[in-house]
Image (cartoon, helix red, strand yellow):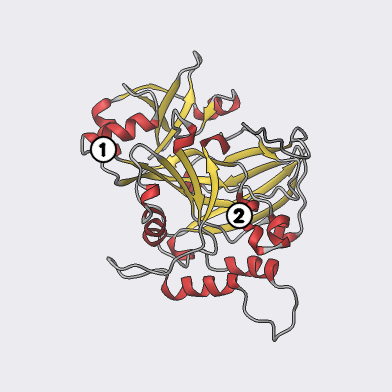
């Protein structure tokens, strides 16, 4: 089953539950955040909570998307309380592209890079036995809810950015209860939009390269994540497909378990603050940048994996509004 949010014809946010072809409005809630909060307080699963609230009128989700009424599948009324973070080098094969970015020479005697070292650690220790803690993954911060872009809305390349590249990923969606306990709402498709040229310039610029917008949705998968997820990432330019490549995700294709990635994020008290939302990106092994694709304004990113619901699409726009020097005023 899938959850999404759309705007009604009157402009109000509606929560939609889709089961197969049947998509209906969830009664008596204003948004997904409220639905999750009520389920936690009632000690019910999301499915049981929805069953108790009941379902209303049918919705044509594709029509809503075409009418630009799709919004993020979950949001916080205060964007500062939605945190977007992620982990890299988590997928089998994901080290190759990263290692190539950070290796300065093809000399066989070149020392192993930090990227390859952390990847190998994940392969060996990223899936610990139940109740045990595994290898610590790479971790990065992307931004808060102000950087979260709805499906079908444009991802913006800052004027200072050197690259604007897609990263087709799965994201975990979480809410923190009043007692500080993380609850997983579900999983969604995500575009962890990044600047790979900046990252390639110096590994210590990885943090800068990740401080970009990101998109997730349109739907949240409720329940277990499939072990073997197969999708396609595309870049559309005009009427043509500029680039297309399949990608793999799910635990069978990852060097870390989901539980291990979750532990190494939520072990920090900072990320267990009551009421906060978290969107945590699980990484990828597939990038158009690795095939020397250079995106430009007007390109459309499309990430499609039917096991995670309706495809995620975002056009690319380029900002020219940022000043050359960011002014700071002394008080």
| Helix, strand or loop status at disc 2 | helix
Give the number of the disc on residue 75: none
Evaluate if marks 2 and 1 touch, with contact meaning CB atoms under 8 Å apart.
no
326 vs 212, nearest the viewer: 326
> Is residue 46 among the parts visible in the rendering?
yes
Of pointers 2 and 1, the one earlier in the residue sequence: 1
Query: What residue did someone put label 1 on?
Result: 40
Task: Name the residue at 48% across, 18% down.
Answer: 8
Residue at position x 48%, y 74% from top?
Answer: 121
Image coordinates of residue 68 in percent, x first then y, are 59, 25
Residue 47 locus on image (x, y percent): 29, 37
When the figure is inspected, residue 32 is found, relative to residue 302, above or below; the finding is above
Q: Residue 207 carries which label?
A: 2
Query: In the displayed structure, does residue 91 sit left or right of residue 17?
Result: right
Mark 1 element type: helix
- Mark-to-mark CA distance, 2 and 1: 34 Å
Farthest residue in the top direction?
A: 10
Q: In which image quadrant can residue 275 be found?
A: top left
């Amino acid at each position: 089953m899938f959850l999404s949010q759309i705007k009604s014809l009157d402009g109000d946010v509606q929560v939609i539950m889709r089961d197969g072809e049947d998509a209906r409005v969830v009664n008596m809630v204003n948004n997904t955040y409220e639905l999750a909060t009520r389920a936690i307080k009632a000690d019910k699963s999301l499915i049981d909570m929805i069953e108790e609230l009941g379902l209303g009128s049918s919705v044509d989700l594709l029509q809503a998307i075409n009418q630009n009424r799709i919004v993020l599948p979950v949001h916080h009324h205060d964007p500062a309380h939605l945190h977007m973070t992620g982990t890299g080098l988590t997928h089998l094969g994901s080290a190759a592209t990263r290692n190539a970015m950070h290796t300065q020479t093809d000399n066989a005697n070149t020392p192993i890079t930090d990227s390859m070292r952390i990847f190998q650690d994940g392969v060996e220790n990223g899936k610990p036995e139940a109740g045990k803690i595994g290898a610590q993954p790479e971790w990065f911060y992307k931004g808060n809810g102000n950087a979260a872009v709805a499906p079908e809305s444009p991802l913006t390349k800052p004027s200072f950015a050197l690259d604007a590249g897609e990263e087709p990923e799965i994201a975990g969606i979480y809410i923190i209860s009043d007692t500080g306990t993380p609850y997983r709402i579900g999983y969604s498709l995500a575009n962890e939009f990044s600047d790979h040229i900046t990252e390639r310039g110096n590994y210590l610029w990885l943090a800068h390269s990740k401080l970009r917008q990101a998109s997730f949705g349109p739907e949240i998968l409720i329940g277990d994540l499939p072990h073997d997820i197969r999708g396609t990432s595309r870049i559309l330019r005009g009427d043509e497909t500029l680039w297309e490549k399949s990608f793999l995700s799910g635990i069978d294709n990852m060097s870390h378990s989901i539980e291990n990635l979750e532990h190494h994020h939520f072990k920090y008290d900072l990320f267990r603050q009551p009421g906060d939302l978290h969107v945590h990106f699980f990484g990828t092994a597939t990038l158009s940048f690795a095939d020397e694709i250079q995106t430009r304004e007007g390109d459309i990113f499309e990430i499609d994996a039917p096991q995670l619901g309706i495809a995620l699409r975002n056009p690319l726009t380029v900002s020219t509004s940022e000043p050359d020097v960011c002014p700071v005023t002394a008080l």
